[in-house]
Amino acid sequence: MTRFAAAQPDLFVAPGPAAAQETTEDPLAELAALLTRVRGAEHPPWPDAAAAVAEEHRALGLAQRAGPEGAAMAEAFLAETERLLALTD
């Protein structure tokens, strides 16, 4: 019997350089794409509330990396998310 499932990494080995590497895309560009997608939506683009929360967390993480301009964009994204979720009530 092996200790690991087929796709499970060894948790006691230091991660390689690929695991520590963040996305190379510009966080402001990613935030702008997210914001554009929700501003143009007439209904929530997420299948459920869990997906909406995951997208909000992604936007907040990008905003943290992007600085003050990213924070303003994340605030606008959260407002648009609230608008879309209010349509489902």
Image (cartoon, grey):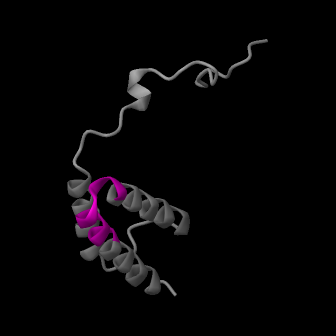
Residue 73 falls inside the magenta stretch: yes
Q: Residue drawn 38% across and 68% down?
A: 45
Q: Residue drawn 58% across and 23% down?
A: 9
Residue 1: quadrant of the picture: top right
Q: Residue 33: x, y in percent?
A: 23, 60
Tell me if 79 is positioned left or right of 33 in this view: right
Tell me if 45 is positioned left or right of 27 in this view: right
The reply to whether residue 37 is in sight is no
Tell me if 11 is positioned left or right of 72 in this view: right
Q: Looking at the image, which residue sits at the far top? A: 1
In terms of depth relative to the viewer, which is nearer, 10 or 41? 10
Residue 82: quadrant of the picture: bottom left
Above or below, 43 against 86 in this view is above
Tell me if 57 is positioned left or right of 79 in this view: right
Q: Residue 54: x, y in percent?
A: 48, 59
Above or below, 22 against 8 in this view is below
Q: Which residues are magenta?
A: 64-74
In terms of depth relative to the viewer, which is nearer, 72 or 81? 72
Q: Residue drawn 26% across and 52% down?
A: 27
Residue 31: quadrant of the picture: bottom left
Above or below, 26 against 48 in this view is above
The rendered magenta stretch, by its main secondary structure, is classed as: helix
Q: Residue drawn 46% across and 60% down?
A: 57
Above or below, 28 against 73 in this view is above
